[in-house]
Amino acid sequence: MKVICNRARLAEALALVSGVAVARSPRPILQCLRMQVENGDNPTLTLQATDLELGVKCEIKEVEVIEPGQVVANASKLSAIVHEVADETITMNLEQESLEVMASGSKFKLFTFDPSEFPPVAPKEEGKIISISAAELTRAANLTVYAAARETTRYAINGLLLEVKGNKMVMVGTDGRRLARVISTLETKVDTEISSIIPARTIQMLSRVATDSDNMVNIRIMENQVAFEVGGVLLVTSVIDGKYPSYDAVIPKESTTKVKMDRLTMLSALRRAALLVSKDSRGVKVQLAQDRMTIEAHSPEEGEAAVELPVELEGEAIKIAFNPDYLIDPLKVLVAEQVVMEFRASNAPAVLKSGSDFVYVLMPVTI
Amino acid sequence: MSKIKVLPVHLVNKIAAGECIERPASVLKELVENSIDAGATRIDVFLEQGGCKLIRVVDNGGGIDPEDISLTVTPHATSKLADEDALWSISTMGFRGEALASIGSVAQLKISSVVPGNDSGQTIEVDGGQISQKTPCAGSPGTTIEVHNLFFNTPARRKFLKTTATELNHCQEHLIRLALAYPNVAFSLMHGNRQLLQLSATDSPRQRISDIFNPQLADGLIQVFTQTKNITFTAYLSRPSQAKSSANWQYFFINKRAIRDRFITHALREAYRGLMPPDRQPVGFLFLEIEPSIVDVNVHPTKSEVRFADSGLIHSLVLGAIRERFLSTDLTAELSLAQSTQSADSPAGTQPENTAEHQQKIKEAMKDFFRTNSQSTQSKIKFFPPKSQNSHPYGESTHYNNTPPSPSATPKPADEPIKSAFPPITDSPSEPLPQKSPSDEVLPPSSTATPYLQIHNSYLVVETPDGLMIVDQHAMHERVLYEQLKSRVNSGPVLKQKLLMPDLINLTPAQMAHVEQIKSSLDQAGIEVEPFGPQTLPFIPCRQSSPSLTPPNSSTTS
């Protein structure tokens, strides 16, 4: 195998792929990536890495193939080398059992592994394919992924729910205290219903991959796997086996108080108030009356804060308390100028809405 | 023709004897209890062949009136119970009036008694149920009872007697229990020509424990005392470090009666929970004085079990008192190396050690230890001189939180850090201390604080002014978190984050009842529970304590 490659493009791909390779593993081959060079009409260099849960495959077209072949070598070392050298191109050559990496003035030799031992990164079956624009998928991912739980024993909520029904795709994230749900419209209808729980890590990865908003993403949903294919990158992930909570039951249908406010004003007000919540009890009191919202924070050790902002209030005045971080999270990633919040009681869930497709349910705290 | 007959008296007695006279030890127990009930202040016991051949109990008690002496061996004749009401407030050891009659039916019994103030007394003999005429005798005040050839007329039972050593052991154990309950009575025990116990009267139960067992054990015991309206509880308990591998070292007394009781056993275990490994048993002498009306001692023929009017009350009283005492006591295990070799009752010749020579030996042994073990322990032992601003070993929290320690944390040549951690052990000052690279954060060159050593990622060994301290860091971490939560709860209401989707827990009815009891404590800690469904058992903890006390996304309730 011998190939000359655009360094910047390779560095970019390596950064993505080596993020999946396992840092420490009893199986050293999982710390590696696999490079495959193909000639013909379409010369490509394909990089692959997997931790057995998530696999990634990335194609680079900016190559000049001298001799096709494949090699398996340490991902982080290769990535670091390509990152450090400054040339425009880089030459890689498999010489006996070593991978030679050559740039001007430097030459590296990396030991390699047997490519046949590398776990394959490929969908296991046909599955059902849905198509969605990269822009819409990233939007849905960004609006829900922060709400997913991290490392709880309720494994299902460590992932995000992906549901497809008709021409609607629903994505849901929850950690048991708040829940984010976003509905996207697909261009094509799907005749069967689909419901999978996808690891949060895959969804995070997805927003890094689907950067070019003009692209379409093909989602292949299988029995135990889901694959995302966009712009020369393939992500194959195992799905989380479990029962996702019935999110619909959690979303309140009624409210007695409804307020409309400017998203950025609200975000900034919360951030200011949150400066003085105590470390032990992260809670701010929110008071709504006469078109004003007052956010108060109190820290026994440091002091207190009170922030006021104008809102459009409909319905009854209310007092309620929240963990400010849980409100800041969605406000940060939303794009709409205005958001709506709905309340029923100070011990009942509150709802943050933007448009008709995004709903965020948040449980209050009692201080 | 009728087939049902009333049994003859001697047969009734033999059957009754089967219940309470099991072996020589039970005879001894009955006799000594009688002596105690008679107000004796000195009781001497002589045994032969573990009590199978002879049990003789000599006391200096109130004696038996000459006209009563033949009644002693009549069944259900007693001086200890006057009327029916008295049965519900028993304050004597015996009360059924069965013992002597039962013993008399299965052995050769001889009772001699002199009432104080009289010059002479009476003797009566019973031989397998046959009562002889009483004859006058001389002697000092008190009663002497001899039991010869126990079970001589019941061969089946005789066959079940164990070896002399076993029977003697049982006798001794029974006498020890009585002696513990009555420290103000002097006891002695002779077996053949051998003196086994010699206990002088004392006011202090601790002194009695010391006389029976050993002074080291007695001195280390923690005394617990508490009193309510009708219960007084005193206990002498070992430190967790003195725990034994069996529960034989636990003695429970209710109104000076040695008993077994699972509620008290459980309370004792519970009080030591977390303080010692689960397979160890504490040493404990627990004395309960309970108003006789709220405890029924008449449930078991040998009176080794009792029934409480309110066993839960006894359990919580015992547990509460011990816990409270432990909380105010430093239970840190201490190992004194130098003193123990001198104070232990080892053969006298070994005591005067040449200290310098001894130190040298230790030094060599330590050196050898590190040399021979350096290969195998190199990857498991880490040395962490603490950061200067934080002298507490726990300050190095990063090493606890399962973050893999940086490669530099593991010393490559094991000899070097060991020398730096324990400078006194190196006897060659010419050897330079290891070079510490600036990036090596766990060995800061400026460190002057106490170094410590981490073993298997689980234990910390820390230098203290007079020795070393070993800390189980996992237990310590739990304790630190517990203390944080406790101080947080005590300083005011805890912030509760409501859960969108409650965690459901399935509980048995007993667990459910317990949760109902601790509901308010859970609420204080920020966890609210509610029964879910009318008939079903699940509970919903629908709130969670403040995020800083629990990892933000963990579900603590599942």
Image (cartoon, coloured by chain):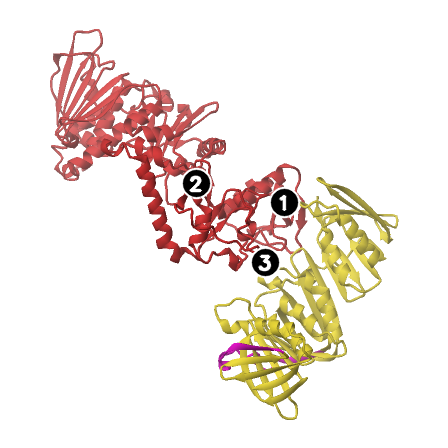
Would you place residue B10 above or below residue B395 in this image? Answer: above
Would you place residue B451 above or below residue A6 in this image? Answer: above
Within 10 Å of disc 1 (Cα), the crowding (few <14, some 14-19, many 20+) is many
Q: Residue at x 69, y 77 (%)?
A: A8
Percent across and percent down for residue A359 are 75, 62
Percent across and percent down for residue B214 are 30, 29
Marks 1, 2: nearer the viewer: 2
Closer-to-camera residue (B6/A63): A63
Closer-to-camera residue (B180/B392): B392
Query: In the rendered image, which residue does mark 3 sit on?
Result: A152
- Chain in yellow, by letter, is A
Element assignment for label 2: strand
* Residue A126 appears left or right of A183: left
Q: CA distance from mark 1 to mark 2?
A: 39 Å
Asked if residue B460 shows in the view, the reply is no
* Residue B474 appears left or right of B370: right
Asked if residue B224 shows in the view, the reply is yes
Q: Amino acid at mark 1?
A: Gly
The subunit carrying tag 3 is: A
Locate the C terminus of chain A and report the quarter of the image it occupies.
top right
Location of residue B259 by image quarter: top left
Q: Which mark is residue B468?
A: 2
Query: In the rendered image, which residue does mark 1 sit on?
Result: B526
Chain B appears in which tint? Answer: red
* Residue B551 appears left or right of B310: right
Magenta range is A105-131
Between discs 1 and 2, the one toward the N terminus: 2
Residue sitting at the far bottom? A41
The subunit carrying tag 2 is: B
Q: Amino acid at mark 2?
A: Leu
